Image: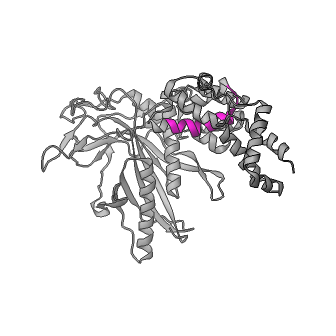
Amino acid sequence: MTTVYEAVIGLEVHVQLDTHSKIFCACSTKFGSEPNANTCPVCLGLPGSLPVLNGQALHLAVKVGIALNCEISKRLKFDRKNYFYPDLPKAYQISQFDQPVNGAGWLLIETRSEDGSWKEKKIGIHRAHLEEDAGKLLHEGIEGASLVDFNRAGVPLLEIVSDPDLSSPEEAYAYLTSLKAILQYLEVSDCNMEEGSLRCDANVSIRKRGDKNLGTKTEIKNLNSFKNVQRAIQYEIERQTELVEGGGRVIQETRLWNDVKAQTFVMRSKEQAHDYRYFPEPDLVPLTIESAAIEAIRKELPELPAAKAARFRKDYGLGDYDASVLVQEKALAAYFEQAIKAHANAKMISNWMQSELLALLNSKKLAIQSSPVSAQALAGLVALIESGTISGKIAKDVLPVMFETGQTAQEVVREKGWVQVTDESLIETIADKIIADNSQSVQDYRAGKKQALGFLVGQMMKASQGKVNPKLANEVLARKIGV
């Protein structure tokens, strides 16, 4: 995007709340059941059926609202959002319009500045309201027809609507990862995008840089991953910029994201947009939430990611990046703290978790909870490095063996004979051979090329299969060569 224009982005995130039953009936919310197995007259919208609010759904919604610094409504009501679509059995959706459970709030995100430093930005939360999900259309099986599965109809959703405070695809990605982390810490949803537990729509517009008026927005749907949210927003910014710079104008419309073609395309224009004709849901009375109930829920909140990251920086001396990575997943942060209890070198443990361990887990598509290497075992590996028993190079060979066998680092090192060489007389013998075989590098070092010593140390490590203590190798070589 040229510097003439800036993007204005708002996100609408639908979160499936982790309840056993639907929001207005007792049907199961279990994913993967046979089509239409989890249905009843209420969620099928049959005449005479009456909805009853699931108290747990309201409880979880308030918990999220508190975590997002929202104004919790003391009085709330439900409304009918009227539109017709085959997966909506009643031809209206029970949602919330002017009195949602959660009003205005905010969420802090962290992004990198152009100079590489980390910066915080407060993103406004416009509202977070409760509603029921629709069913699901299956466009397969019968030629020229679609099938409808109503298992999802009536599943409790919390729609979290941000203010248009995001200004780049990177900020949108940071917002979503921060929001997901909070939801998982609260244990209100599994946030599984593949199963539809977390869905996101993006509203995107551009305006001349510095202009206070909002431009015409487009809404992007069908975004099934955070990466695709980022890609779709980037594409839409570029499309709108090219359109405006070419003398055209942006039309308010809903667009779908095509992951294969990596582009958006029109779903419907503003002229086709729905008039939802909201009116109060007559079968559900307005509710009052007592202050004491809100405070009781507030006491249930765990330490949230931002607070945990601040504590990791303060108590363990971690940098902003390390702390932010470790707290993105509750289980990852717990693994780190378990390792710290076993061996108190936070920086080394953080480095080994983020680089070697996570790489192994990702290669096997395993979560940290399923790691074959326990937190205590990883701490044991770091302890061997720090004590000089093994080098960092050898440790990179030890960890995969631990991962495959479940052995401790001590067991692997003993079995493989990988204990680091610290015998100075043996190191001197190896050094003599390296000096004799690399006369040009020796001359370069004597001529003042300090990097030549690093090359010679590397040759010693290679000759000893990584078993020589690098610090001693440096000292012995420098002494023997002299300057």
Give the image location of residue 63, x and y in percent.
Answer: 49, 33
Q: Residue at x 39, y 72 (%)?
A: 249
Q: Which residue is drawn at 17% across and 46% down?
A: 146
Name of the residue lying farthest toward the left: 143
Q: Does the magenta stretch include residue 193?
A: no
Residue 483 lies, with reference to residue 60, above or below; the image says below
Q: Colour mode?
A: one colour
Give the image location of residue 362, x and y in percent.
Answer: 48, 38
Give the image location of residue 388, x and y in percent.
Answer: 72, 30
Residue 308: quadrant of the picture: top right
Q: Residue at x 45, y 69 (%)?
A: 241
Name of the residue lying farthest toward the right: 483
Give 226 or 55, whichever is nearer the viewer. 226
Name of the residue lying farthest toward the bottom: 247
Q: Does the magenta stretch include residue 347?
A: yes
Residue 88 lies, with reference to residue 272, above or below; the image says above
The prevailing secondary structure element of the residues shown in magenta is helix
Q: Can residue 307 be seen in this snapshot?
A: no
Q: Can residue 90 be seen in this snapshot?
A: yes
- Tell me if 105 is positioned left or right of 449 in this view: left
- Tell me if 95 is positioned left or right of 237 in this view: left
Give 392 or 85, whichever is nearer the viewer. 392
Residue 389: quadrant of the picture: top right
Residue 22 lies, with reference to residue 407, above or below; the image says below
- Tell me if 196 is positioned left or right of 85 in this view: right
Q: Which residue is drawn at 73% across and 50% down?
A: 438
Give 193 or 152, whichever is nearer the viewer. 193
Total of numbered circles in the picture? Answer: 0
Chain part drawn in magenta: 343-360
